[in-house]
Image (spheres, rainbow, N blue to C red):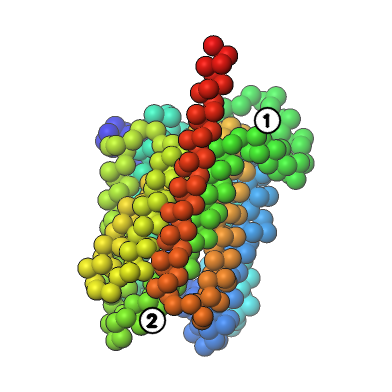
Amino acid sequence: MYRHVLKNKNILYYLAGAGISQLGNVLAGLAFLFISYELTESAALTTIIAISQAMPYLLFGLIGGACADRVNKKRMLVAIDLLRIPLILSLVVLFQLDILAFWHLLAAAFTVQTLGCFYNPAYRAVLPLITPIEQQTTVNSLLDTVTRGVQVVTPLFAIGLLNAGHAIHFYTIDAMTYLASALLILKIHWVVPIDQENMNETKRDGLFYSIGVFFWWAKREGTVTHLFFATFWMVFFNTWVWQVGLLLLLLDRFPGSGQEIYSLLLGWYGFGVILTNIAIPFFWKTLTFSLYLWGSIVWGLGLVVLGFASYPPLYIAGVFIAAAGLPLSSLARVYLIQTLVPADMLGRAFSFNAVLLYGSNILSLAIFGALASVIGIQKLFIWCGSLMVITAIFYLFRALLTENTRRKAVKALE
């Protein structure tokens, strides 16, 4: 199965470009945090750097998706990659001249992520153009495996540079990945699935009008609307407990070794996600909204187990259960967007999905971060995991009722 898919050179170039870009993104993200703290020794200012990397998606995410649907995707992707090279290398030059300041990092972080608002939906929208529909589940699985694998391995690679005192050269490597990505994109070939007349009509529409057209279309598509709403709630209940709560829980439960256990669990989590990603295409060729919800139920149950955990084996089990549910939910969401949304709206669909994710992340971090001071972290794990399961079951029953109603309507017409 995988061997047959990888014979397609377009898919090979696409996956290689995604992996290389992810390597640069992870290194740059670490560099912004490390160097900002080194310059300021302020946790608050370092947090501002982190926020500056999320805010552009809330401000420009929808506009980026609308642009991705209107322009030549290959030209835009290559142009953005080439534009980011001097931008990120300027930080290395300023550092070498000993004049690098916090505001330089802030401006660069915000600008790089703003460009990502246009780049990411366009790159995502290319995959259905180069992949036969019967292979999309397999390719999505490979894409997620590559990007998550890079996320797991990159911090280990970064340790060597950190020990040598060369954190600034995270940016140098990031710039090199942009160049490699641009070269790989130039090798990918695809055919635009809409005729020139429709393309010209799309270009005459205003950006905000085209965004409105997408919302009007999505509102009439029940599955797409339910998918977006369910995604918002799943991410909202997961983000704080997973990104912050798990570390705090382990530090409190295992004083002196919490960080080491946390690092080991993240590695175990990465292994579980990759293993699940590889297995999914062997069981399902097409992914449905029901599968998305079942994956979310398993994902939520993993958080519930972590909430009740008191010994390492239970933490290992909870993390692995979450790692089994998340990929099924994530891949099903991407597959549904790729197959249910028209090709000329994919950029807007993926950008709106990103806006939902980042908006939900920020709300989750703010609200549950405040609640953690008055509610125990274990209780938050149990509460959030349970709410994920309840929300998924609610949408599952709603989907079943909608399907039964549709079948009755068809029988009545017959």
Q: Nearer the viewer, residue 4 or 288?
A: 288
Residue identifier under label 2: 165
Residue 328 located left or right of residue 168: left
Q: Is residue 174 visible?
A: no
Q: Quadrant of the C terminus?
A: top right
Q: Nearer the viewer, residue 254 or 346?
A: 254
User: Which circle's residue, 1 or 2, is located before the other in the chain?
Assistant: 2
Q: How many marks?
A: 2
Residue depicted at 58% across the width and 14% down the height: 413
Circle 1/circle 2 CB separation < 8 Å: no
Residue identifier under label 1: 199
Above or below: residue 410 compared with residue 160: above
Q: Amino acid at mark 2?
A: Gly
Q: Nearer the viewer, residue 355 or 297?
A: 297
Above or below: residue 304 compared with residue 65: below
SS of the residue at dot 1? helix
Above or below: residue 406 compared with residue 188: above
Q: Which circle, 1 or 2, is nearer the viewer? A: 1
Cα separation, mark 1 vs mark 2, equals 51 Å
Residue 234, image x and y in percent? 49, 55
Residue 362, image x and y in percent? 57, 66
Residue depicted at 54% across the width and 79% down the height: 46
Mark 1 nearby-residue class (10 Å; few <14, some 14–19, many ≥20): some
Residue depicted at 69% across the width and 27% down the height: 198
